[in-house]
């Protein structure tokens, strides 16, 4: 196992355990039940998707529904997943990380953009992060950080991940009406 995968599989915060006390459950939110109007991915559906390892890949950590009230799923890590696997083609709103292996930075960018979805992408690099982040086809990009949400920033995706923005100064445009007037004098 590579060091990156080992680091992902290592628990970093016991307070984020799905088996936490009721007080800590506020820190681990239930999964979003409806992904889009055209399909719904329930917790059981997520389990089916994750466990479809017959397409290739290995389940390293997690992979199961947590039996408790609500819709909870174990933090999950899949490695060696082929780029054409079904899980690579679905928009997943759950605690699932999927590691794909590619041969170059260009291949990684191509694989990241080869999807109908584009809510958020992440770029980690010491040298070329901004150059590649600019080329990611997503509405939001986290550069060298794991959290992109910020009240001052606009939230929204592109492609099948949404249209428009909310929040930030550009989000106010969603509430304005623009009028074009062509006048001849």
Image: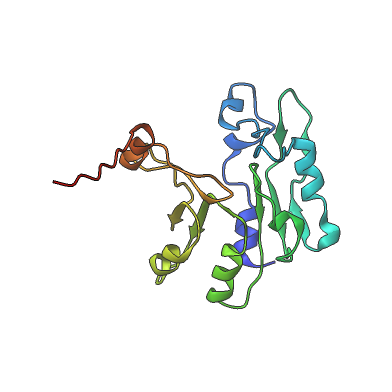
Q: Residue at x 54, y 75 (%)?
A: 106
Residue at x-position 83% and y-position 53%: 52
Q: In the image, what residue occupies the spot 47% across and 62% down?
A: 124
Of residues 152 and 23, the one nearer the viewer is: 152
Percent x, y of residue 94: 65, 42
From the top left corner, tell me how far across and down residue 77 is, in percent. Answer: 69, 53
- Give the quadrant of residue 56: bottom right
Residue found at the far front of this picture = 185
Q: Is residue 55 left or right of residue 36?
A: right
Q: Which residue occupies the extreme right position in the image? A: 54
> Closest to the observer: 105 or 16?
105
Q: Is residue 48 left or right of residue 174?
A: right
Front-lying residue, 110 or 104: 110
Residue 42, compared with residue 99, is above or below; it is: above
**Quarter residue 75 falls in:** top right
User: Eyeballing the image, is 14 above or below 12?
Assistant: above
Would residue 15 appear left or right of 146 to someone viewing this image? Answer: right
Image spot of residue 104 (x, y percent): 57, 77
Residue at 39% from the left image edge and 43% from the top image edge? 154
Q: Nearer the viewer, residue 157 or 92?
A: 157
Query: Which image quadrant: the N terminus?
Result: bottom right
Residue 149 vs residue 3: left or right? left
Q: Quadrant of residue 93?
A: top right
């Amino acid at each position: 196992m590579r060091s990156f995968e080992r680091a992902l599989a290592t628990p970093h915060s016991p307070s984020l355990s799905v088996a936490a006390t009721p007080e800590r459950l506020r820190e681990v939110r239930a999964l979003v039940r409806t992904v889009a109007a055209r399909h719904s991915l329930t917790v059981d559906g997520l389990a089916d998707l994750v466990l479809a390892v017959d397409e290739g890949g290995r389940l390293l950590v997690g992979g199961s529904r947590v039996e408790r009230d609500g819709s909870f799923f174990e933090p999950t890590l899949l490695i060696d997943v082929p780029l054409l696997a079904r899980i690579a083609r679905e928009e997943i709103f759950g605690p699932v990380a999927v590691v794909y292996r590619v041969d170059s930075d260009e291949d990684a960018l191509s694989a990241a953009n080869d999807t109908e979805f584009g809510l958020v992408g992440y770029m980690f690099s010491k040298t070329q992060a901004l150059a590649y982040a600019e080329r990611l086809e997503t509405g939001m990009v986290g550069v060298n950080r794991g959290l992109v949400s910020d009240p001052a920033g606009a939230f929204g995706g592109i492609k099948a991940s949404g249209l428009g923005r909310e929040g930030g100064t550009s989000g106010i445009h969603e509430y304005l009406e623009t009028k074009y007037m062509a006048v001849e004098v």
